[in-house]
Image (cartoon, rainbow, N blue to C red):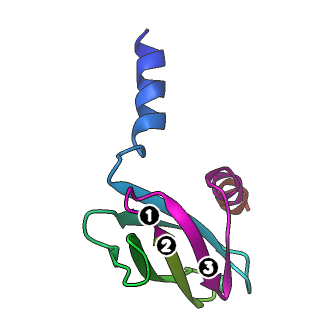
Amino acid sequence: MGFLKSLKSMFTASSDPNVLWLYVKCKRCESPVAVRVDLRNDPSLDDESDGYILRKEIMDDKCFTLMHAQVKLNARHAVTEKTIDKGEFITEQEFLVMRNTQMSK
Ligand SMILES: [Zn+2]
């Protein structure tokens, strides 16, 4: 019971409804980066829709490429569109695998 409980809290730790995690990788060195977004403060109102727009500068810690991510959210904070230059969006799963691979090198 105790184990299951701690396992569960491990998985739900990042499910704060006000927090959005973006996972990207650098196109140049393939370094994975995770970025925490505070949905209460980071996005700004999008003039073109009734949602929000978030612009984020992300730098990887290997070749220090500065990536510009732009994420569009609807009024309920669900992601409707995301683009990034010099990088690529990856899933949380991919991020964890890449991080683990890097650490074991
Ligand atoms: Zn890089």
- In the image, which is nearer the foreground, mark 1 or mark 2? 1
**Quarter placement of the N terminus:** top left
Q: Quadrant of residue 82?
A: bottom right
Q: Which residue is mark 3?
A: 83
Q: In whole angstroms, how far apart are the C-alphas of marks 1 and 3?
A: 15 Å
Q: Position of residue 34 (x, y in %)?
A: 52, 65
Above or below — where is 16 with respect to 81?
above
Q: Is residue 13 magenta?
A: no
Q: Position of residue 22 (x, y in %)?
A: 52, 65
The answer to whether mark 1 and mark 2 are in CB contact below 8 A is yes
The secondary element bearing badge 1 is classed as loop
Q: Which residue is mark 1?
A: 74
Residue range (magenta)? 73-98
Above or below — where is 68 with respect to 22?
below
Q: In whole angstroms, how far apart are the C-alphas of marks 3 and 2?
A: 9 Å
Q: How many marks?
A: 3
The secondary element bearing badge 3 is classed as strand
Q: Position of residue 59 (x, y in %)?
A: 52, 84
Q: In whole angstroms, how far apart are the C-alphas of marks 1 and 2?
A: 7 Å
Q: Residue at x 60, y 90 (%)?
A: 65
Q: Is residue 34 left or right of residue 16?
A: right
Q: Residue at x 34, y 73 (%)?
A: 43
The picture quadrant for ligand 1 comes to bottom right
